[in-house]
Image (cartoon, grey):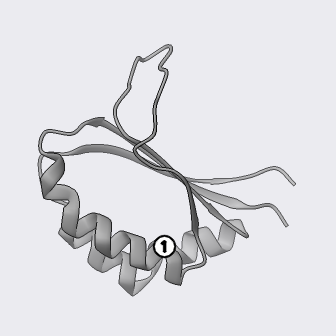
């Protein structure tokens, strides 16, 4: 079964402290959904579009599991806590077996 991944890129973070509530709720939701954080707040070398802000990579055992975790009540509560004023590009992608 192909793994599933959440990929989040934040092109702009204006006030990182305002992400605290979201980060806590999202972390709980990810763990409850079986996700494993592979990258978060790490170093980034950017090419092409040149976005060097925060990149988050989370792995799930399957693509459907990744989608279900996003649609879960726990993660939907986390999204409500995501403050205005942040740019984010979020994708759920299927890995290669």
Residue positioned most to the front: 42
Q: Nearer the viewer, residue 18 or 74?
A: 18
Neighbourhood count class around disc 1 (C-alpha, 10 Å): few under 14, some 14–19, many 20 upward = many
In the displayed structure, 32 sits above or below 10; it is below
Spot occupied by residue 93 in the image (x, y as percentages of width and height):
63, 52
Residue at x-position 40% and y-position 44% = 41
**Quadrant in which the N terminus appears:** bottom right
**Quadrant in which the C terminus appears:** bottom right
Q: Is residue 85 left or right of residue 33?
A: left
Residue at x-position 49% and y-position 13% = 48
Task: Residue under label 1, please give it.
Answer: 30
Helix, strand or loop for disc 1: helix
Q: Is residue 55 left or right of residue 20?
A: right
In the displayed structure, 75 sits above or below 4; it is below
Q: Is residue 79 left or right of residue 81?
A: right
Spot occupied by residue 24 in the image (x, y as percentages of width and height):
30, 71
């Amino acid at each position: 079964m192909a793994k599933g991944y959440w990929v989040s890129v934040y092109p702009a973070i204006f006030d990182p402290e305002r992400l605290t509530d979201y980060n806590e709720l999202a972390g709980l939701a990810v763990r409850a959904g079986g996700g494993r954080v592979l990258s978060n707040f790490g170093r980034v070398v950017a090419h092409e579009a040149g976005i060097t802000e925060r990149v988050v990579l989370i792995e799930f055992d399957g693509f459907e599991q990744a989608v279900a975790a996003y649609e879960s009540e726990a993660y939907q509560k986390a999204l409500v806590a995501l403050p205005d004023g942040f740019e984010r590009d979020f994708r759920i992608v299927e890995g290669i077996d």
